[in-house]
Image (spheres, coloured by chain):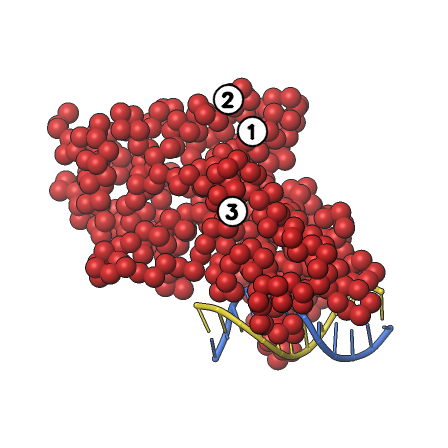
Chain colours: A red, B blue, C yellow
DNA sequence: GCATGATCATGC
DNA sequence: GCATGATCATGC
């Protein structure tokens, strides 16, 4: 074997060698590109090619990191462009979960932490209809988890493992956790694994970093690149951690967030506004969003780092005097033409409903005065996503295909999800597959369902 | 100018 | 009081 152009025992040497990839494709950087790199079929083709032809070692699935002596795990992962911005094309998979073996593991010496403590991330821009050997590497980043992130990941790991120990591996959901998810592998297949403490077969799953977490790494890396290129310090993005100190001190993340609201429970919204110096008008549509931000200790324009990384959806809920939510919760409007093409498992609706939500809850009194009564984190149970939401989705597809886009599932037809207009006004129409123009619509979560779910 | 999330209005 | 339809406000 020819001598490698880097020292596999030395972290700096490995990183420096990897950084030469930035701005290049495999075709550009390799003098001799083997004619027969097989990119077809397997998804990790690009990563495999980097390992084999650039770093010169055989891809493996050993329990230790790829560069064992340096403790570094190499991960090639795709980027895509959304509105001219680079974002993660997908979550980053960090190893299959062995339901049986993990039952007796402890975090400190877990398979996960042994392999994934130091990630060498190679981000390449994936482009459709392009030969993978022409994909250009855009970012190389050695990622050591910041202490507060690692602590949240530990809490996520414990939560996933606890569910497996309870014999509930089949109920795992990516929305259960914050940064580290238990994502399905080959979700369309019928492959099932046995799990401890339950006869129920479970879908195979892997640990993964959510796409939202990957996006913060991408943003930070691009800001660094830009700062380096222009030899200036870029203004930090308006994103700030609100619970880092508490979490490092050992507090559960969600408890830490709830604690931030405790001093204001029982106060009217305008009293909270006064205490926190909020000048927004109570009628403004972002009034409650501003109040939430201020209670979290942020300025109106700042965003919560943890919520962003975990892709947590923050919602204000106002309960009427009769105790039911004043509004249902809307999702983004769909395009009829796109919707009928979607498969349920990769649909926008399933994606939106699999996230974790954070509700800030106010009770309205007879005069309409809102009083803060509490907060709740919530994820839609997998069984409801797969039954109720799926039924609404299937029915919606069915009716659009039958050219009945005016008559989509109403609130009275489904306990959890319905379809309703969602445009600028009644003139905001888009084409159905048959070419007719019908007002823009979206899926909505029924307020009554949420209320029941939150135990309100 | 438009998408998105939030909220209002109407009629039963 | 509620389901359904319609529209607004904000930020990019």
Q: How many other residues sit within 10 Å of disc 1, few (<14), some (14-19) or many (≥20)?
A: many
Q: Secondary structure at mark 2?
A: loop
Q: Is residue A173 above or below residue A277?
A: above
Q: Secondary structure at mark 3?
A: loop
Query: Where is mark 2, residue-wise?
Result: A105
At a point 56% along the width and 55% down the height, the residue shown is A296
Q: Quadrant of residue A406?
A: bottom right
Q: Which one is earlier in the sequence, the residue at label 3 or at label 2?
A: 2
Q: Quadrant of residue A158?
A: top right
> Which numbered tag is attached to residue A161?
1
Q: How many other residues sit within 10 Å of disc 2, few (<14), some (14-19) or many (≥20)?
A: few
Left or right side of A121 for A189: right
Is residue A299 among the parts visible in the rendering?
yes
Q: Nearer the viewer, residue A161 or A425?
A: A161
Measured Cα–Cα span from mark 2 to mark 1:
9 Å
> Which numbered tag is attached to residue A243?
3
At a point 42% along the width and 29% down the height, the residue shown is A113
Q: Nearer the viewer, residue A46 or A22?
A: A22
Q: Which one is earlier in the sequence, the residue at label 2 or at label 1?
A: 2
Contact (Cβ within 8 Å) of mark 2 with mark 1: yes
Foreground tag (1 vs 3):
3
Q: Secondary structure at mark 1?
A: helix
Q: Position of residue A361 (x, y in %)?
A: 69, 56
Name the subunit of mark 2.
Answer: A
Q: Are marks 3 and 2 on the same chain?
A: yes
Quadrant (top left/top right/bottom left/bottom right) for the N terminus of chain A: top left
Q: Position of residue A55 (x, y in %)?
A: 22, 34
């Amino acid at each position: 074997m020819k001598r490698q152009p880097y020292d596999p025992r030395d972290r700096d040497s490995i990183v420096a060698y990897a950084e030469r990839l930035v701005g290049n494709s495999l075709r550009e950087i390799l003098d001799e590109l083997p004619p027969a790199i097989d990119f077809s079929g397997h998804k990790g083709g690009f990563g495999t090619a980097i390992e084999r032809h650039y770093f010169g070692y055989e891809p493996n699935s050993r329990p230790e990191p790829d560069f064992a002596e340096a403790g570094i795990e190499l991960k090639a992962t795709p980027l895509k462009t959304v509105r001219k911005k680079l974002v993660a094309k997908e979550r980053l998979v960090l190893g299959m979960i062995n339901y049986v073996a993990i039952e007796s593991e402890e975090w400190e010496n877990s398979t996960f932490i042994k392999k994934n403590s130091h990630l060498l991330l190679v981000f390449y821009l994936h482009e459709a209809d392009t030969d993978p050997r022409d994909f250009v590497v855009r970012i190389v980043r050695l990622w050591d988890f910041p202490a507060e992130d690692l602590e949240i990941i530990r809490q996520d790991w414990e939560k996933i493992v606890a569910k497996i120990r309870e014999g509930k591996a089949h109920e795992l959901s990516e929305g259960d956790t914050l940064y580290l998810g238990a994502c399905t592998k080959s979700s369309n297949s019928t492959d099932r694994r046995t799990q401890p403490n339950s006869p129920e077969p479970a879908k195979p799953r892997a640990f993964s970093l959510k796409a939202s977490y990957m996006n913060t790494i991408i943003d930070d890396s691009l800001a660094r690149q830009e700062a380096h290129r222009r030899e200036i310090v870029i203004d930090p993005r308006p994103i700030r951690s609100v619970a880092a100190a508490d979490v490092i001190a050992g507090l559960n993340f969600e408890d830490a967030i709830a604690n931030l609201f405790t001093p204001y429970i029982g106060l009217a919204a305008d009293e909270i506004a006064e205490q926190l110096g909020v000048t927004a008008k109570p009628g403004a549509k972002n009034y409650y969003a501003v109040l939430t931000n201020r209670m979290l200790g942020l300025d109106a324009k700042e965003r919560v780092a943890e919520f962003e990384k975990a892709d947590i959806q923050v919602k204000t809920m106002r309960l009427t005097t009769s105790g039911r939510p004043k509004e249902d919760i809307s999702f983004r409007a769909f395009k009829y033409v796109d919707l009928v093409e979607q498969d349920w498992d990769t649909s926008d609706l399933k994606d939106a409903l699999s996230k974790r939500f954070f509700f800030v809850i106010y009770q309205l009194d007879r005069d309409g005065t809102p009083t803060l009564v509490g907060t709740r984190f919530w994820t839609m149970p997998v069984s409801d996503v797969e039954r109720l939401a799926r039924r609404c989705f299937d029915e919606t597809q069915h009716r659009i295909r039958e050219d009945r886009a005016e008559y989509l599932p109403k609130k009275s037809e489904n306990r959890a999800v319905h379809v309703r207009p969602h445009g600028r006004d009644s003139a905001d129409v888009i084409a159905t597959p048959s070419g007719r123009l019908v007002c823009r619509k979206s899926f909505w979560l029924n307020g009554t369902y949420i209320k029941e779910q939150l135990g309100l």
